[in-house]
Amino acid sequence: MKAIILAAGIASRLRPLTNDRPKCLLKIGNRSLLERTIDALLENNIREIVIVTGYLHEMLESFVQTRYPSLSIKFIRNELYASTNNIYSLWLALPEVQQEKEIILLDSDILFDPLMIKILRDAPHANCLALDSHKLGEEEIKVIVNGKNQITELSKTCSIEKAIGESIGIEKISHAYLLALHEELEHMILHEKLDNVFYELAFERLIARGQYFYPVDTSAYFSMELDTPEDFHDAINRIPKHLQA
């Protein structure tokens, strides 16, 4: 199994904290977000990692190579990071994992308990995502399911009242879904020029082709996304003791 970490963005909402470093190199406790993500993958025996870089890519790549000299890491550079969104970074990375039976896809701005990856890996469905059930607002990527617990809507704009929780930004994706996803992204980016949207839009479009994700409730485990300086300071205060090191 391989993992893709999307880490190309500027993270302008986190300025001034990101004026001189990518968001994923911000430290919570003794480790950066990226270290925590890579360490979580290693704890779950995932040792082949694709990282999509962009903003301050030299700093990020140098850090990873120094910190993890023996690890198999492939860097993909999103040269258009300033004008594209994570859908474009994902599209760039997919050719590196097309032969995999399954992969783990992660956003790079999540602080989370490594056990969440194990829970996803052990989940019975081939395609699933980590879900946090909590009070929702406008900013979260919200999840709506049908009677079969298949995700039918996945966006910031879907109904708060109908949503069962927030997609955290960690997914397990099967080989069959990867092929369908690559085809969809090719069309969206090359023909529709939809390179500045969230990749969840592609997930929603694949629903019409019978390709579903299933939610895996990980609410019992700590996680939070860091979008603003307030989030960063909140994370320092909220992170559980067993994750602080």
Image (cartoon, helix red, strand yellow):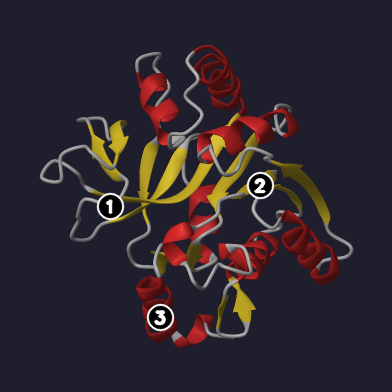
Residue 71 visible (yes or no):
yes
Which residue in the structure is indicated by mark 3? 233
Please report the residue visible at 25 percent of the width from the left and 57 percent of the height from the top. 133
Which residue in the structure is indicated by mark 2? 3
> How crowded is the residue under tag 3: few (<14 C-alpha within 10 Å), some, or many (20+)?
few
Q: Are marks 1 and 2 in contact (CB under 8 Å)?
A: no
Please report the residue visible at 37 percent of the width from the left and 72 percent of the height from the top. 231
In this rendering, the answer to whether 205 lies above or below 53 is above
Which residue in the structure is indicated by mark 1? 139
**Residue 189: where, in percent of width, then height?**
54, 21
Answer with the quarter of the image where residue 57 lies.
bottom right
User: Which quarter of the image is occupied by the C terminus?
Assistant: bottom right
> How crowded is the residue under tag 2: few (<14 C-alpha within 10 Å), some, or many (20+)?
many
Q: In the structure shown, which secondary structural element does the residue marked by tag 3 occupy?
A: helix
Please report the residue visible at 71 percent of the width from the left and 33 percent of the height from the top. 97
> How crowded is the residue under tag 1: few (<14 C-alpha within 10 Å), some, or many (20+)?
few
Q: Which of the two discs, 2 and 3, labels the residue nearer the N terminus?
A: 2
Q: CA distance from mark 1 to mark 3?
A: 18 Å
Three-letter amino acid code of the residue under disc 3: His
Q: CA distance from mark 1 to mark 2?
A: 26 Å
**Residue 139: where, in percent of width, then height?**
27, 52
